[in-house]
Amino acid sequence: MKQLILITLSACLLAACNNNDNAGANKQPDVVVVESAGKKLFINNCMQCHGLKTDCTGPALAGVLGRWKNDTTKLTAFIHNSQKVIAADGPDSYAGKLFDKWYKTSMPSFGGITDDEIKQIVGYADKGVE
């Protein structure tokens, strides 16, 4: 019985080796994973404090547009400078309530990120799909 198993395993190994010799002729193309610009920006700028579906230092960002009532102008301004939006809109605004909910922890200002980059981040994060 042991000999039969060894012979079978040896035959499989030889067949695998022989297939590798011809791999170039029948080689399938490598799968290339392309990350979206929004995902890259999210990883580089947001992931330190935000998860997509899990609260971290800041709230999870999946569904963020709905929570901001699709007000991308206000959301963009908040990302650029949260304290400026909170001061302008007051403590009863969504931004003010968000600030209170997160123990009065300010989100860092992201003045160096363009509006287009914010749009890409929000487009990626809002879906909550990795």
Image: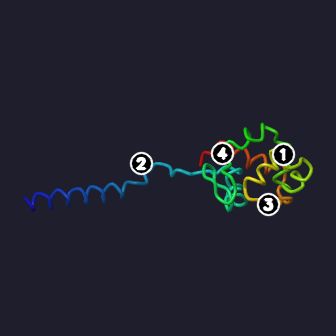
Q: Which mark is residue 62?
A: 4
Q: Who comes first in sequence, dot 4 or dot 3?
A: 4
Quarter where residue 46 is shown: bottom right
Q: x and y percent of residue 112 in the render?
A: 85, 60
Q: Who comes first in sequence, dot 1 or dot 2?
A: 2
Tag 1 secondary structure: loop
Q: Circle 3 sits on which residue? A: 106
Rendered image coloring scheme: rainbow
Looking at the rendered structure, the kind of residue marked 4 is Ala
Looking at the rendered structure, the kind of residue marked 3 is Ser
Tag 4 secondary structure: loop
Foreground mark, 1 or 4?
A: 1
Given contact means CB atoms under 8 Å apart, are the residues at marks 1 and 4 in contact?
no
Q: Who comes first in sequence, dot 3 or dot 1?
A: 1
Who's the residue at 67% across and 56% down the image? 50
Q: Circle 1 sits on which residue? A: 92
* Disc 4 from disc 3: Cα separation: 20 Å
* Disc 2 from disc 3: Cα separation: 56 Å
Q: Circle 2 sits on which residue? A: 26
* Disc 1 from disc 4: Cα separation: 23 Å
In the picture, measured across the screen, residue 36 lies left or right of residue 115, that is left
In the picture, measured across the screen, residue 26 lies left or right of residue 93, that is left
Tag 2 secondary structure: helix
Foreground mark, 1 or 2?
A: 1
Q: Who comes first in sequence, dot 2 or dot 3?
A: 2
Looking at the rendered structure, the kind of residue marked 1 is Asp
Q: Who comes first in sequence, dot 4 or dot 2?
A: 2
Q: Please state, as top left, top right, bottom left or bottom right, where the N terminus lies in the image.
A: bottom left
Q: x and y percent of residue 126 in the render?
A: 69, 43
Q: x and y percent of residue 95 in the render?
A: 81, 48
Closer to the camera in the image, 60 or 1: 60
